[in-house]
Image (cartoon, rainbow, N blue to C red):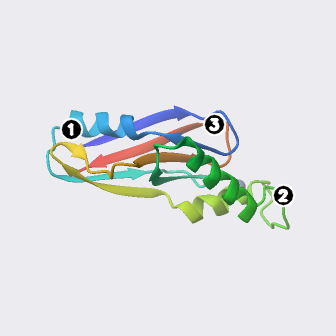
């Protein structure tokens, strides 16, 4: 089963918690045991699984990525968004979680985050459940 989520981001860099949307997709699939792949078909966005309980964690992740890869730098790419491409490569474009008892088997503190690095834009996220 495949589902495409469309989301509108609001900031240039932004982490958006999509855990509930993934849970809904898994639930709608009726698959009790399997794999859920969350795939981002963009070159300046990604996906990661990390702590969702304390909202300051995502702020620290974004701030640290910005420190590591500043928006302005001595980049070659003429579009002016090299930092976003590099950050997308660092976090990756896919995440996989196990499905157990019809639910994503996430750890207690884990959440699934869509990572926008060149917003605001409308983005697609492909969820494949097998
Ligand atoms: Zn570019």
Q: Is residue 24 left or right of residue 117?
A: left
Q: How many marks?
A: 3
Contact check, label 1 and label 3, Cβ < 8 Å: no
According to the picture, the residue beneath numbered tag 2 turns out to be: 72
> Residue at (42%, 36%) from the top-left corner?
5
> Residue at (38%, 35%) from the top-left corner?
21
According to the picture, the residue beneath numbered tag 3 turns out to be: 121
Q: Which of marks 1 and 3 is nearer the N terminus?
A: 1
Assign a secondary structure to mark 2. loop
Whole-angstrom CA distance, mark 1 to mark 2, is: 43 Å
According to the picture, the residue beneath numbered tag 1 turns out to be: 29
Residue 111 x/y as whole percent: 42, 46
Q: Quadrant of the N terminus?
A: top left
Q: Earlier in the sequence, mark 1 or mark 2?
A: 1
- Tell me the tag on residue 120: none
In this view, the residue in front, 100 or 57, is: 57
Quarter of the rendered image showing ligand 1: bottom right
């Amino acid at each position: 089963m495949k589902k495409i989520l469309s989301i509108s981001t609001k900031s240039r860099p932004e982490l958006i918690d999509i855990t509930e949307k993934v849970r809904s997709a898994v639930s709608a699939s009726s698959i009790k045991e399997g794999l859920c792949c969350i795939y981002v078909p963009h070159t300046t966005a990604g996906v990661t699984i990390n702590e969702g309980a304390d909202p300051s964690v995502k702020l620290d992740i974004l701030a640290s990525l910005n420190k590591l890869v500043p928006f302005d730098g001595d980049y070659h790419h003429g579009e002016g968004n090299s930092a976003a491409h590099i950050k997308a490569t660092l976090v990756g474009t896919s995440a996989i979680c196990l499905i157990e008892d019809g639910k994503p088997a996430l750890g207690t503190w884990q959440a699934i985050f869509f990572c926008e690095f060149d917003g605001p834009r409308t983005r697609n996220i492909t969820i494949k459940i097998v």
